[in-house]
Every structure is written in C-alpha cells, then in structure tokens.
Image (cartoon, rainbow, N blue to C red):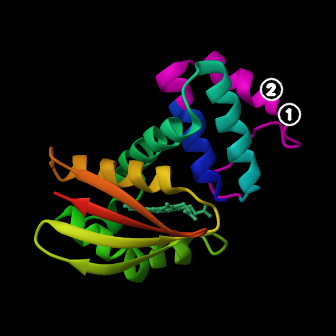
Amino acid sequence: MLGLIFTTLVEMVEEKFSPEMADEIITEANFPHGGAYTAVGYYDFDEIVTMVTLLSQKTNIPPEELIRAFGTYLFEGFTETHAHLIDGKQSLFSVLVSLDNDIHQQVLKLYNEASLPSFRVLDQTENVLRLEYTSERHLEPLAVGLIEGAARFFGHDNLGIQQEKVSDNTTIFIVTI
Ligand code: HEM
C-alpha cells in the first residue's frame, strides 16, 4: 500500500486524537522500519490493519468507524495534494463514475505499484448511482468514507449509501443524493 495512505493516517491520528497517541501506536506496532513512512514508498497492507486495530483498542471506536472517518479525511487531503485529479469534475457522481477510467488510472501513472480496487458503474439516474466495488482488501468502510468526503466537497447534505454484499470481494454501493 502506498506510503501516502500511511502518512495521512498518522496525520489524522495526531490531529483528531493526539501526537502521543500516534507515537504509542507506532511504537507498539513495532514495524521493522520504525514507522518512518515516506509518502512515495510502499508498505505491507497488514501494517494498516495493525495500526487501525491498535487505535481501535485504545479509543474503543470500532475499526470500521475509524476507517470510514479516515476515508473522509483522506478525500479532503486528496483535494489538496491531488487537486488536479478532481479539478475538472462537476459533481459527486462524475467523480465516482470516473474512478476506474480516469482518477485511479492517473493515480497508477503517478504510483506504479499502487494497489487499487475496481469500481464498475452498474446504472445511474439523476439521483441514484449503483457502483460495484471489487477488492481483495475489503476496504468498504474506506470507500464509504471517501464517498462521504467527496459528497461533502460537492455540498451534498442528504447523501445515502446502502451496501449489498455480492460475493467475498464484491459489494454494490447504492449512492443516493
Ligand atoms: C482525487 C481522488 C482520489 C485519489 C487521488 C485516489 C487515490 C488513491 C490511492 C493513492 C490509493 C491507494 C493505493 C495503494 O495503497 O496502493 C487509493 C485507494 C483506494 N481508493 Fe482512491 N483515490 C481517489 C478517489 C477515490 C474515491 C472518490 C473513492 C470512493 C469510492 C476511492 C476509493 C478507493 C478505495 C476503496 C481504495 C483502497 C484500495 C482498495 O479498496 O483495494 N478513491 N486511492
């Protein structure tokens, strides 16, 4: 997983909890690299699971909730660090329909070893979009948080997200605005 994801998670923990909490987690996780993440490096996916598990134990907040909040935080970060990928987009749905063919394609050009999910548009009306998420990393809560972050960015207050599990690696998101 791309280092940027880890550096952003550490930043969120520092900001929303405390710098001490971030230090504690990194120390207890006892990673070989000592937690010195660089944004353009790549690290084991398991490390994010370890950090979220530790944070959940210390805060008594369920991991899913932490990952979802992180998704929203991450999207806010992307609007600054990767503004050019969102600049041309006029709406939440235009971001979501362009993930596979545009946004994440460009991410892959920037970071060749990024491990990205697939988002297939099943159907779309003015207010409802059905999006099929496939990933072996099972980051549904991250996707929900990212969608919520994007919805906030485009000024939606009445967002709804329903989930239907299709198979082990696939979930359909029904996004309503
Ligand atoms: C400018 C917008 C975006 C950028 C720059 C971006 C970039 C990235 C990057 C760098 C990763 C990590 C790849 C890795 O760790 O190797 C990632 C993963 C991911 N992205 Fe995006 N993304 C954007 C928007 C979105 C949005 C709106 C969604 C909402 C559905 C989304 C869903 C995900 C998910 C769920 C993952 C985790 C990997 C997985 O599930 O397998 N992304 N994205």
Q: Residue at x 31, y 49 (%)?
A: 148
Residue 167 is covered by the magenta coloring: no
Q: Which residue is mark 1?
A: 30
Amino acid at pointer 2:
Thr
Q: Position of residue 114 (x, y in %)?
A: 62, 69
* Image position, residue 6 (x, y; %): 63, 46
Assign a secondary structure to mark 2.
Answer: helix
Label 1 Cα crowd, 10 Å radius (few <14 / some 14-19 / many 20+): few
Q: Quadrant of the N terminus?
A: bottom right
Region in magenta = 13-41
Residue 57 lies in quadrant: top right
CA neighbours of label 2 inside 10 A, class few (<14), some (14 to 19), many (20+)? few
Q: Residue at x 60, y 35 (%)?
A: 10
Q: Is residue 155 left or right of residue 105?
A: left
**x then y, percent, for residue 107:** 50, 71
| Residue that appears at 45% across and 47% down | 71
